Image (cartoon, rainbow, N blue to C red):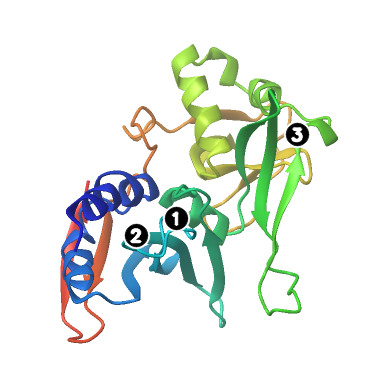
Amino acid sequence: MEQANFMYLTEEVLPSLGFGEILDERLHQSMKMGLEKIELKVRDQQPSGEYLYNVVLEKQKVNPEDPERERRYYANRVEVTFKMNGEKEARQHTFGLYKQKGLPLNQMRNLMKGNYVHNSYWKEGVQKQRWQYVDFSKTTEEGVHPMKSIWADSIEWNLAKELSALPHVNALSADVKEDLLRAMKNGDNVAASIKMDGSRQNVMLRANPKKSAIEIFKPDGEKISLGKKTGLSVVNDGQMGSKNLKAASELVTDAFDDDSGSKKKVKRG
């Protein structure tokens, strides 16, 4: 096993995907065995349902024109299965990597829930911006649900302005509004509360660029339309300022070995 290859995967590739440390031991053992293909699975129980991530690594030549050069392991894809609470069939999608970079764990999770994620990249000196989503209503000839893009310059919708138009949001500090914007672009459901008919109700906010709207819904999924006199306030659960804007609930994954079937709890704060 080439130590430099292992260090690169465990210090750069896997952490950037959101799988830092919890897969290192199994990856180390698999690389020592010299397997052509390595599959590292992580189970993630969330309030919305259960996720199973399968990080697939394969041996490839560093330089195809140099057959004598030792092959290295590269992360190829992340296969995700999501069993949402209340749904009979599990959702499945494979997220590819480009130059050993891919979507982080929290964005993959949000896409599997049917949310939209905003990202950008540079092409020929021009920054391209888009919203991406997995279209679970369509299936390709290969039997997969396609990833689709909504290009920012093709829709007349400004998320920052939509946020500012919500009741009481303008009264928030600039930092909190920036965190709100970042969370919604990340595909997060943002916790808030509204006052309707004299009582306060907990709701969630999410961006829907397909409808050019910020959707407001109850925890059970029922959508709400705000009246002009409806008050809304953002719930500060202490997570808004965190680097990855993690959910308020703690992420606990089951890292397990396929052959032995043994499991170990790995807590990530």
- From this view, report whether residue 170 is shown above or below residue 245: above
Q: Nearer the viewer, mark 3 or mark 1?
A: 1
Q: Earlier in the sequence, mark 2 or mark 3?
A: 2
Question: Where does residue 98 sit, x and y in percent of width and height?
Answer: 53, 50
Q: CA distance from mark 2 to mark 3?
A: 44 Å
- Looking at numbered disc 3 in the image, what kind of residue is underneath it? Ala
The CA distance from mark 1 to mark 2 is 7 Å
Instruction: Kindly check if marks 1 and 2 are in contact, taking CB atoms under 8 A apart as contact.
Output: yes
Q: Is residue 158 visible?
A: yes
Q: Residues within 10 Å of mark 3 (few under 14, many from 20)?
A: some
Instruction: Give the mark count.
Output: 3
Residue 57 on image: x %, y %: 38, 66
Callout 1 amino acid: Asn
Quadrant assignment, res 124: top right
- Circle 2 residue: 69
- How many residues crowd around disc 2 within 10 Å: few (fewer than 14), some, or many (20 or more)? few
Q: Toward the viewer: 8 or 70?
A: 70
Mark 1: secondary structure: loop
Check disc 1 and report the residue beneath it: 63
The kind of residue on which mark 2 rests is: Arg
State the CA–CA distance, disc 3 to disc 1.
37 Å
- Residue 160: image x %, image y %? 65, 23
